[in-house]
Image: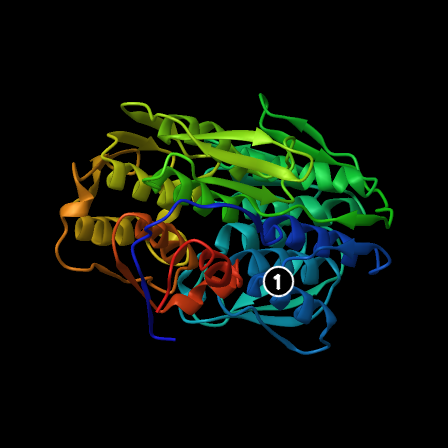
């Protein structure tokens, strides 16, 4: 599908949405279960392409693992195959080959894994050649680039002969995602000693215990429904999102607190969380260091509702599926908004449009092969007609998105 036209919403909506399962939780559980020799029982695994790619590659007995565009899958499997001493060529799409992996590879080399780059140093594709002896029980790794490197090392740590001590340098980003990994490991019987003040994570040699585990719904996916409610012109719009937990392991559950400023109240129910409209605040200041995947959703809402906002903690967006900072700057201009870099790689300001409904020409939003660009801009159809190019990119994390959204927004 080359594009999809979303017609301006004309009615209020009261309904229930069966959210997609968490890709982040699914991918961690899959690696841990693989380290249990696949003896556990995982329920409600995500239908997201990233997760389905992980499942396929864990089952395949091939010399090459093509992760496509799945960053988490690339990082987690690089560590997993390394720990198993498996010889594996790790590769992916052209964009994946532009996303750095050097920090993780350096750490794995430190403990004795042989890995060679096949094109550019620090980037896929890379060849895992073997792991005979653990040469060190300590690695030092930056904490401000990607928490996925840290999670990848943590999950294999208890299976290493000497365990692993991870020393973190600099600021530590996305701590909730690291905490999710630690808590999932605990569910499977492994203890991690975390000292956040000293910036150390220590894991002694231990055995994972296979268990039955059910994956929660995806808070990242939930954020787009918060956007639908926030942008609705009807005060009686209510949406219940099914399968979410109040005490979630997912960092993107921060959307609950963020959206109190942007006009949505969350009430937890037996089945999930009920979203209702409330008055929004006059401005927003937020540090996204622990929930960077929410940035696009929140930026679109602020621009569309003309809520002045200041953001920090979004530096990692420049090395995601696309340069999300640049993509936001390009696309927000189409609705009279902008994302302005006030301090290089630190402080950003969102500027909005006082009346987005005055836009006379239907905006056409590019998605940059980025699922979150498509899903973040689609809820603008609560206010105006919009066109989303390459809408199929949502299969990466939320394949049912357009089907679910059709409950509220007419599509052509």
Mark 1, Cα crowd under 10 Å, few <14 / some 14-19 / many 20+, is many
**Residue reaching furthest bottom?**
62
In the displayed structure image, the side of residue 234 where residue 194 appears, left or right: right
Camera sees residue 152:
yes
Above/below status of 399 relative to 196: below
Above/below status of 270 relative to 358: above
- 363, 99: nearer the viewer: 363
Quadrant hosting residue 206: top right
Quadrant hosting residue 129: bottom right
Q: Which residue is mark 1?
A: 47
Residue 409 location, x and y as percent?
39, 56
Residue 236 location, x and y as percent?
42, 36
Protein image colouring: rainbow
Residue 269 location, x and y as percent?
64, 33
For label 1, the SS is: loop
> What residue do we see at 49% from left, 72% from top?
118
Q: Quadrant of the N terminus?
A: bottom left
Camera sees residue 70:
no
> What residue do we see at 45% from left, 71% from top?
93
Residue 300 location, x and y as percent?
31, 44
Q: Quadrant of the C terminus?
A: bottom left
In the displayed structure image, the side of residue 273 where residue 62 appears, left or right: right
- 26, 131: nearer the viewer: 26
> What residue do we see at 75% from left, 41% from top?
185
- 81, 33: nearer the viewer: 33
- 314, 48: nearer the viewer: 48
In the displayed structure image, the side of residue 101 where residue 61 appears, left or right: right
> What residue do we see at 77% from left, 59% from top?
34
Q: Count the marks: how many?
A: 1
């Amino acid at each position: 599908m080359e594009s999809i036209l979303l017609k301006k919403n004309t009615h209020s909506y009261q309904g229930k949405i069966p959210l997609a399962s968490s890709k982040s939780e699914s991918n961690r559980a899959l690696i841990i279960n693989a380290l249990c020799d696949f003896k556990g029982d995982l329920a409600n695994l995500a239908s997201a392409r990233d997760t389905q790619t992980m499942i396929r590659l864990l089952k395949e007995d091939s010399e090459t693992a093509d992760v496509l565009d799945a960053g988490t899958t690339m990082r987690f499997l690089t560590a997993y195959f390394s720990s198993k001493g498996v010889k594996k060529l790790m590769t992916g799409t052209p964009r994946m080959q532009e996303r750095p992996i050097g920090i993780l590879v350096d750490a794995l080399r430190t403990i004795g894994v042989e890995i060679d780059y096949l094109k550019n140093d620090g980037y896929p594709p890379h060849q895992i050649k073997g792991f005979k002896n653990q040469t060190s029980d300590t690695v030092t790794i930056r904490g401000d680039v990607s928490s996925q490197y840290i999670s990848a090392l943590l999950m294999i740590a208890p299976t290493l002969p000497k365990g692993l001590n991870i020393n973190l340098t600099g600021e530590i980003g996305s701590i909730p995602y690291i905490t999710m990994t630690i808590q999932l490991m605990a569910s499977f019987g492994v203890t991690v000693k975390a000292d956040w003040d000293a910036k150390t994570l220590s894991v002694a040699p231990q055995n994972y215990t296979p268990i039955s585990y059910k994956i929660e719904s995806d808070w990242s996916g939930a954020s787009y429904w918060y956007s639908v409610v926030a942008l609705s012109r009807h005060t009686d719009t209510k949406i219940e999102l099914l399968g979410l937990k109040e005490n979630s392991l997912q960092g993107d559950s921060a959307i609950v607190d963020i959206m109190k400023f942007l006009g949505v109240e969350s009430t937890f129910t037996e089945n999930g969380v009920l979203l209702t409209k409330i008055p929004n605040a006059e401005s927003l200041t937020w540090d996204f260091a622990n929930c960077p995947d929410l940035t696009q959703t929140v930026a679109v809402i602020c621009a569309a509702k003309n809520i002045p906002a200041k953001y920090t903690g979004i530096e990692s967006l420049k090395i995601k599926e696309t340069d999300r900072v640049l993509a936001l700057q390009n696309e927000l201009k189409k609705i009279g908004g902008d994302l302005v870099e006030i301090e290089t790689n630190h402080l950003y300001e969102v500027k909005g449009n006082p009346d987005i409904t005055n836009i006379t020409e239907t905006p056409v939003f590019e998605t940059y092969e980025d699922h979150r660009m498509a899903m973040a801009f689609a809820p603008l159809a609560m206010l105006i007609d919009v066109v989303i190019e390459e809408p199929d990119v949502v299969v990466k994390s939320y394949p049912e998105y357009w089907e679910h959204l059709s409950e509220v927004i007419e599509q052509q």
